[in-house]
Amino acid sequence: TEWEEISAYQTVDYIDGAIANFGTDDAVFLHALAEAYAFAWNLRYAPTETRRMTPTEHAALMAQFKTNFWDMTISDLNGIKTSIESKY
């Protein structure tokens, strides 16, 4: 659905923002990462008949976000982007 695509796009956009501010502006980095997490979480509510990501795939996506955002790496962030871009 359109809102699902918007959520996926926004997740990737905020991940890009987090990458751009990684190690340079902690406040902007954490804000962007929190927004990315929220938009990625929203993907779980897509209607079953139209969703592009299975519940298992969504759980795997969310598991890529570490419990402690300070432990995230550029590689982790790019992995999240790849997971989303492969579906949307």
Image (tube, rainbow, N blue to C red):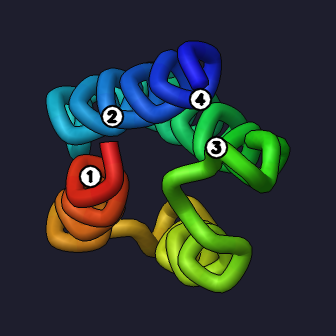
Tag 2 or tag 3, which sits nearer the N-term?
2
Q: Which residue lies at the image location 63% right of the left edge and 17% below the top edge?
A: 3
- Is the C-beta separation of discs 3 and 4 under 8 Å? yes
Q: Is residue 27 left or right of residue 83?
A: right
Residue neighbourhood size for the residue with mark 3, other residues' Cα within 10 Å, grouped as few (<14), some (14–19), many (≥20): few
Tag 2 or tag 4, which sits nearer the N-term?
4
Q: Which residue lies at the image location 26% right of the left edge and 52% below the top edge?
A: 81
Mark 2 secondary-structure assignment: helix
Q: Amino acid at mark 2?
A: Val
- Is the C-beta separation of discs 2 and 1 under 8 Å? yes
Q: Which residue is mark 2?
A: 12
Q: Which residue is mark 4?
A: 4
Between 26 and 84, the residue placed more toward the observer is 84
**Quadrant location of the C terminus in the rendered image:** top left
Q: Is residue 6 visible?
A: yes
Question: Residue 50: which disc?
Answer: 3
Using the numbered discs, state the Cα–Cα distance from disc 2 to disc 1 in whole angstroms.
6 Å
Using the numbered discs, state the Cα–Cα distance from disc 4 to disc 1 in whole angstroms.
15 Å
Tag 1 or tag 4, which sits nearer the N-term?
4
Using the numbered discs, state the Cα–Cα distance from disc 3 to disc 2 in whole angstroms.
20 Å
Q: Is residue 26 visible?
A: no
Mark 1 secondary-structure assignment: helix
Using the numbered discs, state the Cα–Cα distance from disc 4 to disc 2 in whole angstroms.
13 Å
Between 88 and 75, the residue placed more toward the observer is 88
Q: Amino acid at mark 1?
A: Lys
Residue 41, percent across and down?
Answer: 72, 48
Residue neighbourhood size for the residue with mark 2, other residues' Cα within 10 Å, grouped as few (<14), some (14–19), many (≥20): many
Using the numbered discs, state the Cα–Cα distance from disc 1 to disc 3 in whole angstroms.
21 Å
Query: Which mark is nearer the camera, 3 or 2?
Result: 3
